[in-house]
Every structure is written in structure tokens, then in C-alpha cells.
Image: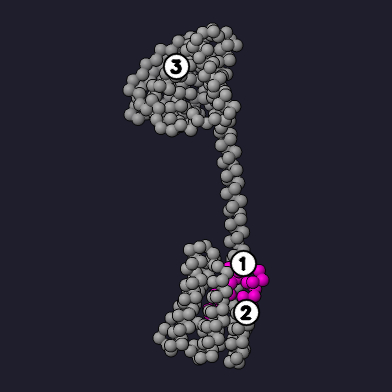
Amino acid sequence: MLLATGLYRASHLVNGVAAAGGTGVAMLLFGVSLTSSAVLFVPGYRKGEFGRYRLWCDVLLTGCLVPVVALATGAAPGAQAGSWVMLLGSSATAAAAAGLSGREAAGAVALVVAVHTACFLQESAARPLAGHLVSLVSSALLAQVFRSYLHRQGVQLDEARERAVRAEAARARRAERTAQHRALHDTVLATLTAIAHQRVDATAPRFRERCAREASYLRRLIQRSDEEDGQGGAIAAGEVLEQAVTAAEGIGLAVSARYHALPALPAPVARSLAAAVTEALNNVRHHAGTSTAHLTAAGQGDGIAVTVVDDGCGFDTGRTPAAGTGLRQSIVSRMQEIGGAAAVDSAPGEGTLVELRWPA
């Protein structure tokens, strides 16, 4: 509204530029109008609001005083609809309707209308008066309509932004639950499955260490501590892969691991990669029908490629491509979320190969 009414005022001031070459009074009136406009619109544009007192000063000066003085001194053609001193009244009523509220705006517009009516009647110019009054009132009404429209659009934009924030919060909560479900599937559920199927000696030191780590994880989950997920920086790939191997050995899987030129990875990437490797090894222990697996990891520039291979029973990838929570969520989706990729190659009786790459 400040910009629109400011441009409207500027178009009226342009008509008064010729006054700079007229009489001293005409130059003074133009200077007063220009100064009042600058005082109203320049600070208003910076602050984002008209300012009640500045608006009233503008109404009194440009809307009332300037045409009265012009008429009294003959410095400018006062009672003419196209006179620049009269045109200023239209931009004065527009600014008042845009910046003042309710009755106060109506009072300011009525004051300008009354003064301009008196000026026209003083010179017996009743014929052009009607058209000029229409200009004064229509300028105010259009400004009011424009103001109401912008306010309504602003309210709708705020509501849309609020809905977007709520939707993002809901998405974040769903993502958090999914991450927790994955972590529970890859750790606690895998351990409980090993115990239930009697695949591991529950008194073995490595298994007890794994249980202790997962108990600590559950305590952090209950307390909603996000310290691990919030850590930044880089983590050595070999360190997190060795942790995954140790966890797998804790449930009775013998892992042959080979590493070559492993880089340091961003913390979120390292943790997601380790979780995907952990689930791939869990799948070997629980589904492949074998107790051995081979892990190979090699650096590729700033990235990494990891393969997990077993000689177990395998499965038909054509019928069950990435089926189940383990492959679909804990491996494939997890790698895609960090900009990586996962591929599974298997066939009945020929074992399984899981290949993880970051970046894709």
C-alpha cells in the first residue's frame, strides 16, 4: 500500500513540477507538498507503516492547506479538476484510507472533501465539482479495497505457512519413528531373534557386550536423547564398520573383513552406512542358513564401496526384490536417504551379495 499510494502521489507531483518556474508562492506550495510527501512515504517505507500522525499532517497540508492557499493567493489554478493542487487531494484521501482505520479514515476523507468542495464553490465552479468529488471518494474506496484484499491475502499466506509448518513437524515425527523402528529392528530385535532361535550362547562375553550396548540405546531412546544423531564432523569408515562386524560376531556370525584405503565420512553417512552393514550381516545370521560372511570395504575417492557376501541358501530376487523391513527399510532406503545406493544380488542355493555405495 505504501508503494502504490506513493506512486499515486508521485504522479500528482509531476503535474506540479511546472510550478517551480512560477511565482514564489507556487514554488513554496510545491515545496510543502514535496516535503510532506517525503516525510510521509520515506520513513513509512522504511518502517513498513504509514504512521498515524504523519498521515494526518499530510492530509492537513497537501489535502487541505495547499489548495486553500493556492485559491487565496491565485498562485495556482485552484478550483479546476485538473489542477495539481486539487489532484493532491486524491492521493491524500487514498493514503488516509490505506493507513487509517474505520471512522478516522472516513473523517480524514470527509475533511478533504469538505475543503475541496468549499474551494470549488468559492469560485462558483459547481460543474467540475461533481467529477472531482468522485475522484476524491473513489481514490479512498479503491485504496480501502486494495488494503482489504492485501490483508486477506496475508492472512491466507500465514495460514498456509502454518499448515506447512505443521505438516513438516508431522513429517519429522514420522521420520523419527521410522528411524527408531529401523534401529530397533537392526539391534534389539536381531538380538532377541538370535536368543529365541538359540543361535548364540547368551552367556558369551561378546553377546553380553552387545546386549549392554543395546540396553544403553534403549535407555537413550526412552529419555529421547539425540546426542548421537546430533553429532557432526567426520568419522573414520573403518571404525564404524568394525563396530558393525563386532555386533555381528556378538550374535554368533563369523565375519571375514578386509579394508582398503577407507576415508573419513560425514557423521550421518558413517552411521547410516554402519547400520546398513549391520542389517546385512544380521540377515546372513538369521536367514542365510550359514554362520560365516565376508565383508570387503574400499575407498573410492571421497566415497566408499562395501560388499557383504555369504554362501548361504540365497533367495529369488525376482519374486522378493528388497522385500521385508531389513532389505527395504534398513538397507535400501537408508542408503538412498544419504545419497548412496544399495544393490542385492542373490539366487536360490547361490548365496547373497549386498553392495553398498556412497555416493551413489
Residue 286 makes an appearance in the image = yes
Q: Position of residue 324 (x, y in %)?
A: 56, 22
Q: Quadrant of residue 258?
A: top left
Can you tell which of label 1 and label 3 is closer to the viewer?
A: 3
Q: Please say if 90 is above or below 73.
A: above
SS type, badge 1: helix
Label 2 crowding class (10 Å Cα cut-off): few <14, some 14-19, many 20+?
Answer: some
Question: Which residue matches tag 2?
Answer: 111
The chief SS type of the magenta part is: helix
Where are the magenta residues, as a range?
87-110
Choose the circle earlier in sequence order: 1 or 3.
Answer: 1
Q: State left or right for residue 318 relative to residue 240.
A: right
Q: Give the CA distance from mark 1 to mark 3.
A: 70 Å
Question: Which residue matches tag 1?
Answer: 145
What count of labels does the image hold?
3
Dividing the image into 4 quarters, which one contains the C terminus?
A: top left
Q: Please say if 84 is above or below 267.
A: below
Q: Position of residue 159 (x, y in %)?
A: 61, 51
Residue 318 among magenta residues: no
Can you tell which of label 3 and label 2 is closer to the viewer?
A: 2
Dividing the image into 4 quarters, which one contains the N terminus?
A: bottom right
> Residue at 59% of width from left, 65% of height from top?
147
SS type, badge 2: helix
User: Residue type at mark 1?
Assistant: Val
Question: 55 and 154: which one is in front?
Answer: 55
User: Residue type at mark 2?
Assistant: Leu
> Residue at 48% of width from left, 80% of height from top?
32
Choose the circle earlier in sequence order: 2 or 1.
Answer: 2
